[in-house]
Amino acid sequence: MEISAILSIIIGMVFVNNFVLSKFLGLCPFLGVSRNTKSALSMGLAVIFVMSLSGFITWLVYRFILVPLDLIYLRTIVFILVIASFVQFVEMVIRKMSPAIYRALGIYLPLITTNCAVLGVTVLNVNKFFANGKSLPGSFVLSLLQSFFAGVGFTLALILMSGIRERLDLNDVPKSLAGIPIAFIVASLMSLAFMGFNGFRF
């Protein structure tokens, strides 16, 4: 496995093809949970966990069940079921371990189930690392790396956004822009800034 392929995945998922700021997936929790850094970090860690394990399980299911049984057309339904199961597990763990974080995340924690970024990375894995129903060499490890660092990119975007929004709360924002309008403006500027990473090539 070439180091350039690993670096390409890491930098690509975190900066160049960031799911929130480049692909515009998962905007609902991005805007809803980014009001303070603690909630943003908690949501980000939960998304990393769900993305990584979803990528792990969906690769195995696709490689050893869907492809051999010629059931590839069921992949979206199967992937959604896997993601929903892990989200329920994460929700139960957070509720048990930290009720304060559970209350802070509120409705956005169950929304990981319908977070298109999580489903997007699982579909991206099978599209990128399978050809003609066969897995490419090293595809399992590369799928795990891609899933994990897609979550890291999502978390980075959340933390950056939460830091900016916390500072905006201390400033005089015009009433017509307060809240969601200024959040969209900030997200747009962050997206433009991340476009500068498109020059990275390996």
Image (spheres, rainbow, N blue to C red):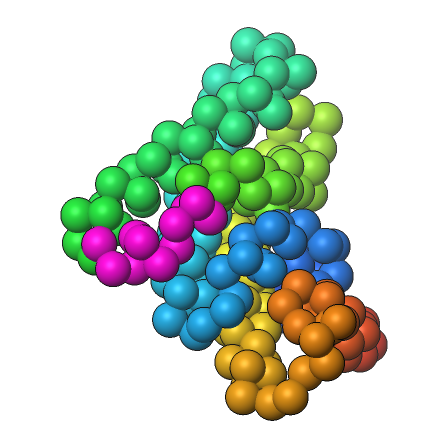
Task: Please indicate whether residue 70 sits to the left or right of residue 60 in the image.
Answer: right
Front residue of this view, candidates 164 and 69: 164
Quarter that holds the C terminus: bottom right
Residue 73 at x, y = what percent? 66, 16
Residue at 63% over, 37% down: 123
Task: Please indicate whether residue 57 sits to the left or right of residue 125 in the image.
Answer: left
Front residue of this view, candidates 115 and 2: 115
Front residue of this view, candidates 183 and 42: 183
- Magenta includes 176? no
Residue 138 at x, y = what percent? 54, 48
Give the quarter of the image for residue 77. top right
In the image, which residues are magenta?
99-109
The overriding secondary structure of the stretch rendered in magenta is: helix
In the figure, 94 relative to 55: above or below? below
Residue at 49% over, 18% down: 65
Q: Residue furthest bottom?
A: 171
Residue 151 makes an appearance in the image: yes
Q: Residue furthest left?
A: 96
In the figure, 199 relative to 106: above or below? below
Q: Residue furthest front?
A: 175
Residue at 64% over, 54% down: 27
Q: How many marks?
A: 0
Residue at 63% over, 68% down: 179
Residue 163 makes an appearance in the image: no
Residue 144 at x, y = what percent? 48, 50
Task: Please indicate whether residue 143 sits to the left or right of residue 52 in the image.
Answer: right
Task: Please indicate whether residue 90 sits to the left or right of residue 162 in the image.
Answer: left
- Magenta includes 108? yes
